[in-house]
Image (cartoon, helix red, strand yellow):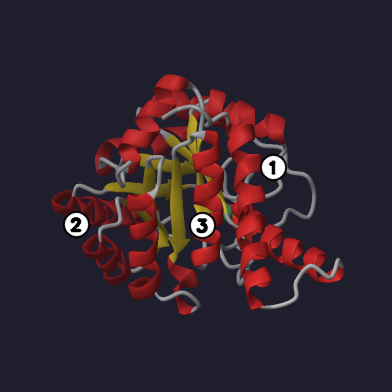
């Protein structure tokens, strides 16, 4: 199966009434675990990495790895730059062959977010890549370094934003936040429905870690077609490694390597089931 454009995956999800998991990865083991789960379930998926994570996993190294893994996979895989904040990094991802990029201007005044997003849409066009942007403010930050306050998406602003920028997918803020929630989140489906009713493009949910399965399902029945999962992957990998050490099952480096793959696999498998993505290839 080829490396695919995110736009195609999300259009199929819109027709089939399911969501596609967009799994953040940091190394080859996580890439392999996520793809194994997707292949087993016959599910399309998105592999992503956020700009803020590139200090640990440089784009010039991890990007080609993600793309090669996507090209070898037995299921359709899109490769996505998550939370791009600088035009230089977004351009680099496009040049490597990422099939979608996110520009995150959610912290900017609306006019500035529109202007910059339009610039990214124009930049991505010659590469045939899809563009995601965000309106409103998802709480927390992608790497946990900032406690960004949540600001729910205004449906009228979302409509104007989508129409003026020409983005392919729009991330909304409906009470979701990055990282582990301090309390079980309850999403604002009233806002989501209003946004869905006035925005034509597929919607994206960030901050997937910790959201209840029934709320995930309600999300994809109300227009969310891409769901980002990051912290849950990292936590599950770490937990699996710890458990296997405690059980005396890690006796050398390659046992550790396999435990990391397994952790990423178990997390992706769980979310693919909740999102009902299996069998859609
Ligand atoms: P979590 O870390 O809460 O899963 O959020 C993932 C995300 O939205 C990445 O953009």
Residue 255 lies in what quarter of the image? bottom right
Relative image position of residue 221 (x, y in whole percent): 55, 23
Circles 2 and 1: CB distance less than 8 Å? no
Q: Which residue is mark 2?
A: 123
Image quadrant where one finds the C terminus: top left
- Labels 2 and 3: the sequence-earlier one: 3
Q: Residue at x 72, y 38 (%)?
A: 212
Q: Which residue is mark 3?
A: 32
- Labels 2 and 1: the sequence-earlier one: 2
Helix, strand or loop under label 2:
helix
Q: Residue at x 49, y 58 (%)?
A: 31
Image quadrant where one finds the N terminus: top left
Quick one: 32 or 58, which is closer to the camera? 32
Indicate the quadrant of ligand 1 in the picture. Answer: bottom right
3D distance between C-alphas at marks 3 and 1: 24 Å
Relative image position of residue 138 (x, y in whole percent): 56, 51
Q: Nearer the viewer, mark 3 or mark 1?
A: 3
Quick one: 36 or 207, which is closer to the camera? 36
Residue 241 vs 266, above or below: the answer is below
What label does residue 211 carry, if any? 1
Relative image position of residue 239 (x, y in whole percent): 76, 62
Crowd rating for badge 2 (residues with CA inside 10 Å; few <14, some 14–19, many 20+): some
């Amino acid at each position: 199966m080829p490396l695919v454009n995110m736009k195609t995956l999300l259009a199929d999800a819109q027709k089939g009434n399911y969501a596609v998991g967009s799994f953040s990865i940091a190394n080859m083991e996580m890439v392999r675990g996520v793809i194994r789960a997707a292949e087993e379930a016959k599910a399309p998926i998105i592999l992503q990495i956020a700009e803020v994570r590139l200090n640990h996993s440089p784009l010039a190294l991890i990007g080609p790895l993600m793309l090669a893994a996507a090209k070898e996979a037995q299921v359709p895989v899109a490769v996505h730059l998550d939370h791009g904040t600088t035009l230089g990094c977004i351009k680099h991802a496009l040049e490597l062959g990422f099939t979608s990029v996110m520009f995150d201007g959610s912290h900017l005044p609306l006019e500035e977010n529109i202007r910059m997003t339009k610039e990214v849409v124009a930049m991505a066009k010659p590469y045939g890549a899809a563009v995601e942007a965000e309106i409103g403010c998802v709480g927390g930050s992608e790497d946990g370094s900032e406690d960004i306050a949540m600001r729910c998406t205004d449906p009228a602003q979302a409509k104007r934003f989508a129409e003026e920028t020409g983005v392919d997918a729009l991330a909304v803020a409906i009470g979701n936040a990055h990282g582990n929630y301090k309390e079980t989140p309850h999403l604002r489906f009233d806002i989501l429905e209003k946004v869905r009713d006035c925005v034509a493009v597929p919607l994206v949910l960030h901050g997937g870690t910790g959201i209840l399965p029934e709320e995930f399902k309600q999300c994809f029945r109300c227009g969310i077609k891409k769901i980002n999962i990051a912290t849950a992957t990292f936590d599950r990998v770490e937990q699996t490694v710890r458990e296997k050490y405690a059980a005396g099952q890690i006796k050398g480096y390659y046992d550790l390597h396999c435990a990391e793959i397994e952790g990423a696999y178990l997390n992706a498998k769980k979310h693919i089931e909740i999102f009902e993505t299996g069998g859609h290839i």
